[in-house]
Image (tube, helix red, strand yellow):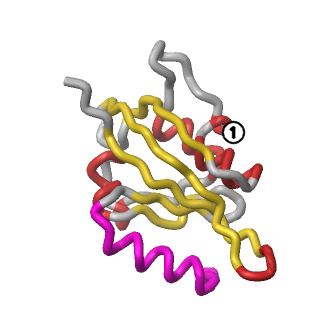
Amino acid sequence: MVQQEVEVILLRQLASQLATPVIVVDPAGDLLYFNEPAEAILGRRFDETDEIRRGEFTAHFQPTDAQGNLIKADALPLAVANDRLVPSHSRFWIRGLDGVRRQIEGTAFPLIGQNDRHLGSFAIFWEIDEA
């Protein structure tokens, strides 16, 4: 296992204590972690989830807009934050790893360490219940 930067370790520790769903990716966009509240939305426990590489997010979660059109991986908030190093916000639908379709909204931020080190990105998101 690759040693993580201290900022990433601390962010993961913080995320594990939050009631808000959080997901963390590395600079390549590969999954590093998601917390327990995110498990309910993503449809699987983190420790039961196989490695998810950047290019696999779309295949795993099938993100779509309100009309059901597939959203390209590089247009998702985590990818925008990771690639452009700017915050990104969006509302869209996913199919969780449990097969359940859910509408989510979230904001992703790049994780920039001291000396402008790009450490990855993280997203805070939530399920939209418009019932």
Given the image, on which type of amino acid does mark 1 rest? Asp
In the rendered image, which quarter contains the C terminus? top left
Residue 81, image x, y percentages: 66, 51
Please give the name of the residue rendered at 64% of the width and 67% of the height, measured from the top-left corner: 111
In the rendered image, which quarter contains the N terminus? bottom right
Please give the name of the residue rendered at 42% of the width and 29% of the height, measured from the top-left corner: 93
Please give the name of the residue rendered at 54% of the width and 54% of the height, measured from the top-left corner: 52
Q: Is residue 9 left or right of residue 19?
A: right
Element type at mark 1: helix
Q: Is residue 45 left or right of residue 121?
A: left
Label tally: 1
Quadrant for residue 38, please give it: bottom left
Q: Please say if 93 is above or below 115.
A: above
Quadrant for residue 130, please give it: top left
Crowding near the residue tagged with mark 1, few <14, some 14–19, many ≥20 C-alpha atoms within 10 Å: some
Q: Is residue 43 a member of the stretch shown in magenta?
A: no
Q: Please say if 81 is above or below 129.
A: below
Residue 113, image x, y percentages: 70, 77
Q: Is residue 9 a member of the stretch shown in magenta?
A: yes
Q: Nearer the viewer, residue 89 or 15?
A: 89
Q: Residue furthest right?
A: 115
The secondary structure making up most of the magenta span is helix
Q: Nearer the viewer, residue 51 or 101?
A: 101
- Magenta region, residue range: 1-19
Please give the name of the residue rendered at 36% of the width and 67% of the height, measured from the top-left corner: 47
Q: Residue furthest top?
A: 67
Q: Please say if 49 is above or below 128.
A: below
Residue 59, image x, y percentages: 54, 36
* Residue placed under numbered mark 1 in the picture: 74
